[in-house]
Image (cartoon, rainbow, N blue to C red):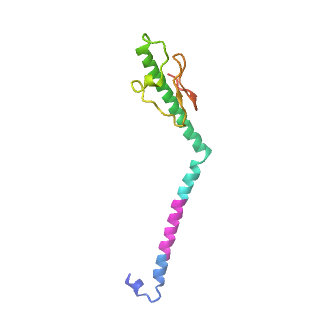
Amino acid sequence: MTHIENSPSGGRRKTLISKIIGQLVIWIVGVGGGFLLTIAVSNTSCFKTVVETGRASNCSDHLHQIETAKGRWLMDHSKLTSKDPTRADLEPKYILWPKCGSGGAYSIGSTDKDPTCSVHGKSKRKG
């Protein structure tokens, strides 16, 4: 190190500094490029399809939970009433009301109808 400091031209110091700066620029471009690549991939139709498929599956599970809660409510109230259950009847004793990941609204349906989602329709789940 003393040799670099004692160098009258400082050439080695400039070379070392330029190498450090060069490596820093390469690292910044690499990180920035990776970030931009992530943004680009997240906007592709394939990525959007995967996300929406996951939301639809989650929604189907929620519809099954609503159907189960409706069935439990009917078991408890079938001899006492002939009305269809409402959200107020089911929540919070039978279910904590879920939210559709795609922004849809859930409809409980009458006692002889399945619950539905305004975005995904009926549950695709069996059983």
Q: Is 23 placed above or below 46 here?
A: below
Residue 4 in magenta stretch: no
Q: Which residues are magenta?
A: 18-32
| Residue 73 placement (x, y as % from top left) | 43, 18
Residue at 50% over, 76% down: 18
Q: Is 27 placed above or below 122 here?
A: below
Q: Residue furthest bottom?
A: 8
Q: Nearer the viewer, residue 33 or 87?
A: 87
Residue 26 in magenta stretch: yes
| Residue 49 placement (x, y as % from top left) | 59, 40
Residue at 54% over, 52% down: 38
Query: How many numbered marks does the figure carry?
Result: 0
| Residue 115 placement (x, y as % from top left) | 53, 24
For the N terminus, the quadrant is bottom left
Magenta stretch secondary structure, dominant:
helix
Q: Nearer the viewer, residue 48 or 99?
A: 99
| Residue 106 placement (x, y as % from top left) | 52, 29
Q: Residue furthest top?
A: 79
Q: Quadrant of residue 116?
A: top right
